[in-house]
Image (cartoon, rainbow, N blue to C red):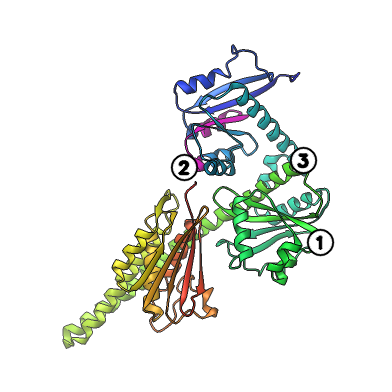
Amino acid sequence: MIDKMTKISLLHIQKSSVQTKKIGAFFEKNECECPFNLDFDYNRVPNPKDALKHIERFEVDVILLKVRETSYSQLDQIQALRQALPYKPIILLCDAMRDTSAKKALESGADDCLHSRGLDRELLLRSILLWHRIRKTESAFLKSCFMTNIDQMFSSVDGEEDAFLESLGKNLKDIEGANWISIFELSEDRNRIRKRFGTSKTCPSEICDNIPAYGTPFWEDFRSKLRHEQTFDLYHKESSKNLEKSEIELFFPLKDVKTTVIPVKDYLNVYGFILIGKRVDDELKETEIVFIKVATKLASMIFQRKAHDRMFSELTDTLRLLNKILRHDIMNNLSVIYGVLNLYSTSKDESLIQDTREAIDRSITFIERMKDYEGSLKLGVELRAEELRPIVEKTFDIYPVDHTIRGNCTALIDDAMTSVINNIVGNALEHSNGSRIDVVMTQKDTEAIIEISDNGEGIPDRFKNMIFDEGFAKGRNPGTGLGLFIVKKIITRYRGTISVLDNNPQGTTFRIHLQSPVG
C-alpha cells in the first residue's frame, strides 16, 4: 500500500465500444477503492491523431492504446506517440497478438502489452503504476546525469551533435567497472561504420572508420543481433578468431574485458551501436540499465535527426537532377532531332533518319528513367507486404534471356520494386556481355534477401563503389548513368541495402536485403 496518493493523468486511445466503457470504468472515482492509492484524471480519444492534438494541449502521464495485430501503420503510430512523449509510459491493449508482433510493438516504443479480453483491473493498474515509476525514474536520472532540463538539452543539440555524443559517452564512462566506451554510427546504406566517440584505449578513428560492416559471418550475425536484441555481450576468446586485426581493435581494445553491445535503433532502422568494455564477471546494475536505455534513445534521436537532414538534402538534389535531365539531356536530343530534320529537308539523305531515331530513343529512355526516379522518392507512400517472385517473373517477360529463379520471399515494398528488378536485369544484359541471369530469393527471420547474378565479364573492383553514383557510365555501351543510381535510391527508401559482389565462377551478383512484414 502506498501512503501518498499518486495522481496520474491517463489518456485512453480507443473508439467507443462496450469494451471501451468497461475499461473506462476502471478509472472512475466511484469504482471500488484502488489498491494502489492512485487518483486518475481519465480522458479518452478515438485515435492516435486526436491523441497527438490532446498531448499538445494537456499534460499526459500515461498512454493506454488499443491495437489489433500490429500493422506497419500502427507501429508508425506508436513511434509518433513515443516521440511526442519520450519519457511517459505507453501501454498497449491487444485482443490477440503474436509474440513477434508484440516484440515489434515494444521495440517501436511501447512499454507493455496486455490482452484486453478479460482484462483484470488490478493487473492493468499494476502495469500503469510500474511503468509510471520507471519512466519518472528515467527522467529524474537523466536530469541528474546531465544537470540540465531535458527540453533545454535537446534545444542545444542543433549543430553540436559531436559535442552532445561526447557528453553522452563521458557520462556512460561513469558506469561502475566500465574500462572504455565507444559510440559508432552506421553509414546510410548500413555497410560501413563511423566512430563518433571513444574514450582512451579505444580503436583509433583512422582504423575503425574504414571497416566494412558486412560480408563476413561475424558481421552478418552481428547485424542480425543489432536488429533483434536490446543488448548482447561479445567475448574475446569466442569472437576474435573470426575477426580481422582492425576488427579486434574495434571490439576488444583490452583483452581481459567483455564487450557489451547496445544497439542504437528504432523499430525500423538500426542507426549504430554503443560498446562498453567491462570486466568479464561484472553485470550491469538496474540503475545502469535505466541510464543506458535513456542514453541509447538520445543517441538514436541524434542519428535520426541526421537522417532527416540527409532526406531534405536528397530532395534538393532531386530537383537539381530532374532539372538537369529536362534542360540538358532531353533538350540536347531535341536540338539534334531539329538539326537533322533540317538537313534531311535539303539533302534527303536516308541515313539521317537513323540519327533522329537514336535521339528519340535516348529521350524516351531519359523520360522512363525520370518515371523510375519519381518512384524512388515517394517518401510518404506506405509500403506493403508483397511476394517478390511474381515481380521477377514479369521482368523476364520483358527480357527473354536464359534464366533460373529459385525460392521466394516477402518484403515491404511498393510499385517501384519493378523498376529495381528491371534496371538490374537490363543493366546486366546490356553491359556485362552475359547470356544468363540467375535469381535466388531467401526468407531469413524478418529479412528478405534477393540475389541477381549474371555470367558476364564482371565489374572491376575499382568501380564497385562507384556504380551507384549518379551519372556513372563505363564500358562499350555506356548508358545514362541513372539506372543503378535509381535502384539504390529506391532500396534506401525501403530501408534496405544493396551491394555488388563477384559471381562464381564469373560475372556479377547484386545482393539486396529488404525488410519483411512483422511476424
Is 212 on the left-hand or right-hand side of 165?
A: left
Q: CA distance from mark 3 to mark 1?
A: 24 Å
Q: Which residue is mark 3?
A: 287
Q: Nearer the viewer, residue 364 or 451?
A: 451
Whether the residues at callouts 2 and 3 have beta carbons within 8 Å, the answer is no
Q: Is residue 234 above or below residue 148?
A: below
Whether the residues at callouts 2 and 1 have beta carbons within 8 Å, the answer is no
Does the magenta run of residues contain 67? yes
Query: Dot 1: within a 10 Å radius of its alpha carbon, few (fewer than 14), some, or many (20 or more) residues?
Result: few
Span colored in magenta:
51-77
- Residue 67 in percent (x, y) is at 49, 34
**Which amino acid type is marked by label 2?**
Ser
- Residue 172 in percent (x, y) is at 77, 50
Q: Which residue is mark 1?
A: 200
* Image quarter (top left, top right, bottom left or bottom right) of the N terminus: top right
Q: Is residue 362 above or below residue 30?
A: below
Q: Is residue 350 above or below residue 316?
A: below
